[in-house]
Image (cartoon, coloured by chain):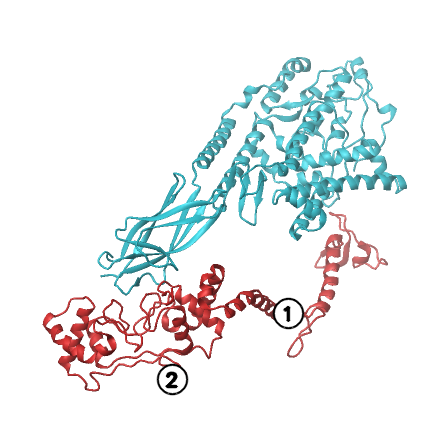
Chain colours: A red, B cyan
Amino acid sequence: MSEAQSGNTGSEPRHLDEPTGQPTTGHVWDGITELDRPLPRWWLWTFYATIAFSVVYMVLYPSIPLVDNATRGLFGYSTRGEVHERLDEARAAKSGNLGRIAAMDLEAIRADDGLARFARAGGESAFKVNCVQCHGTGAAGSRGYPNLNDDEWLWGGTLDDIRTSIMHGIRFDADDETRISGMPAFGADGLLAREGIRAVAEHVIRLAGREADRELAAEGAQVYADNCAACHGDDGSGSREFGAPALNDAIWLYGSTREDILAQIYRPSHGVMPAWGGRLDETTVKQLAIYVHALGGGEAAAND
Amino acid sequence: MSEITEPRASDTAPGGVERFDVEAVNAHRSQSLYAPRVKIFPKRAQGFYRRLKWIVMAITLGIYWITPWLRWDRGAYAPDQAVLVDLANRRFYFFFIEIWPQEFFYVAGLLIMAGLGLFLVTTALGRAWCGYTCPQTVWTDLYIWVERLIEGDRNARMRLDRAPWSADKVTKRAAVWSLWLVIAIATGGAWVFYFADAPMLAVDLVTGEAAPVAYITVAILTATTFIFAGFMREQVCTYMCPWPRIQGAMLDEDSLLVTYNDWRGEPRSRHRKRAEAHDLDVGDCVDCNACVAVCPMGIDIRDGAQLECITCALCIDACDGVMDKAGHRRGLISYTTLKDYNAKAALAAAHGRAVATAAQSGIRLARFLRPRTLIYLGLWAAIGLVMLGLLVTRDRLDLNVLPDRNPLYVTLADGSIRNGYTIKVLNMTPAPRAVGLSLEGLDEADLWLAGTEHRDGSSLRFEVAPDAVGEYQVFVSLPPHAAADGITGFDFVVRDLAGPETTRETSDFYGPEK
């Protein structure tokens, strides 16, 4: 072995280094010689093995870069392909539950513990993609965007109501079945004078159970009965038919301060929610409904 | 390297003692750094320490192979294997003890105790672990026994090893290797039985139904057992194990070590009778090399304490046998402390070998009680007691509370404030439990389970599965006038409805800043 690997052809005399007794390559540079030691056998054969392995590897796996792609390899393996496989596996694993959700109605899904848990998880991930932009990461909303955690529902809080709201949106022009409500601009359109607006605002504040100016509120009561009670109800409890919010509770979509209420009476804001029916498939909308309903404020179905 | 020849008649020392022509593998000659392993063929020894090693081997192997099959009844909801590491369910069972992953510090404590125990044993008895109980020693001993059974004792094995391949050699080697393989598979098999139910896994392994990881583990352990005990043997101890290199820190002048008493043995001579006839001074050592021949590490203890010596004491047995034949007192090689050795050496120098030899006595227990050993013992016992105390007083019912963080609080239509919490009840017993959850420190609060109607009340009841964590989403609400500014602290309390156990966890109720 050492003969084959040393620089010596065997025809010249073998120079031996005195201190170590090992052969040298025979060359001398500046009086310095180089020992000619054989490569360790284990190292050499490992090296040969790696060469053999690499040849096999290059045939079987993608390896040689070409102009705008690379050789595919006999196995046809690619990490992108592996990702596709994983996605297909995930889809297949979920298909059983997704099929059941598509087939069953919402109350039945909610009644099945395991399926409801699956639907809530699916709804949560769809919510995170589609809904958090307006309703917030915790579904708590903000000024003008409803808090979905609470128990006040302008358009109904049962599973079917929630699903309809998601499917058709609120005041969304492109959808024929969208939910619509409108409050006249009492101030901007000149329907009420300034004093009238201030008075009715005071009355509404008193209806909500907060501190209000008694005299002004008494005046406002008449204004309220004439202008507001038709939609908002005599006691301010609102009407889901008209889409008129309840004014006698602690939840105010456009702010609860006196200024906010005055502004809303003067020129009301009307929020818009897109109709998701055209963008999300039915099963996802069902899962979203289950998720939102389970946030804590969901209402029981009418026939319960 | 060693020249291995048969004993010749002229090589027999007086008294009919056979002389072995063998050299220590670490003898003091220049050796190449890259030399391959020198094969050694340890001769069979007979004596007290050999018998002791057989007993220890039987006990240790017995424990290893039998323990997975022991049963312990834990009721219908838990496995009935006495010692089981249930990786899938993250539980460790040891007879009546059940450990959850968060209690893993008990295992850490046991390992610390094992370490301290090892230091204690080493400081008292030298490398008793290495020579008697280490798996490498035990399995190598077993494999050498198999070799001896089929191929014969030292000389026969050496002859067979040198002989060219013949039908006889093939048969014998095949038999040895087959037995080795059976032992190795049994070793790997026993290991996996600690991690699954032994009877079921045994059937699965044989019928091909076991999980791939079981087969792979058995294969790996079979390979390592076969290679380490069949071929690598003393090289594991000399080159792979850190013990020889740290034993120096644990041995002192009072540690018992296998020692060649050279004050008695030197100058060694094979021709004692002749020397005595010429009035020359000779020691008790008759240079028969029996100590080198029986050594499983292949070293010569007469060279002194060395890192290869695992203090298995087989050389003591061999030499005692020779001393008996030669008519001298036993103990030329013996378990001795450095202090004792120095004392005897001084005595021999002053008053002669015979006086010192007569003064040799057995192992005294008093020398085990010294500051070093007592401190090791104290630490070991202290840790043991602390762990025992913790084990006996630990909770079997635990509670974790994760408050909802987004949103922190929700204002409801009637003005009350609602907070959400994820409650985790840990039932660490192998039986289902009914527990009650309630609040303490939050007046006028309502508590209800998410997904159910909000009803007045401040306690809930759960049935928690055995050995499991029950996870529940609950809501707590306070009426508008009762919700204080910002954050209010309170306690969740979980009570075992059938027993006295109670556990509580402090949490916070968030409300708007007023």
Q: State whether residue A159 appears in this view.
A: yes
Query: To which residue does mark 1 refer?
Result: A78
Q: Position of residue B113 (x, y in %)?
A: 52, 35
Q: Secondary structure at mark 2?
A: loop
| View extreme (front): residue | A303
Quadrant for residue B32, please give it.
Answer: top right
Label 1 is placed on what type of residue?
Ser
Q: Earlier in the sequence, mark 2 or mark 1?
A: 1
Front-lying residue, B218 or B317: B218
Give the percent coordinates (x, y) of residue B10: 87, 23
| Circle 1 residues within 10 Å: few <14, some 14–19, many ≥20 | few
Please state which amino acid type lies under the numbered disc 2.
Answer: Asp
Quadrant where the image shows the C terminus of chain B: bottom left
- Provide residue A145's location: percent of width, then percent of height: 33, 73
User: Outermost residue toward the left?
Assistant: A215
Q: Quadrant of residue B235?
A: top right
B505 lies above or below A103: above
Q: Are marks 2 and 1 on the same chain?
A: yes
| Labelled disc at residue A173 | 2
Which corner quadrant holds the N terminus of chain B?
top right
- B339 in relation to B277, above or below: below
Report whether A225 appears left or right of B271: left
Q: Residue furthest right?
A: B167
Residue A2 placement (x, y as % from top left): 80, 54
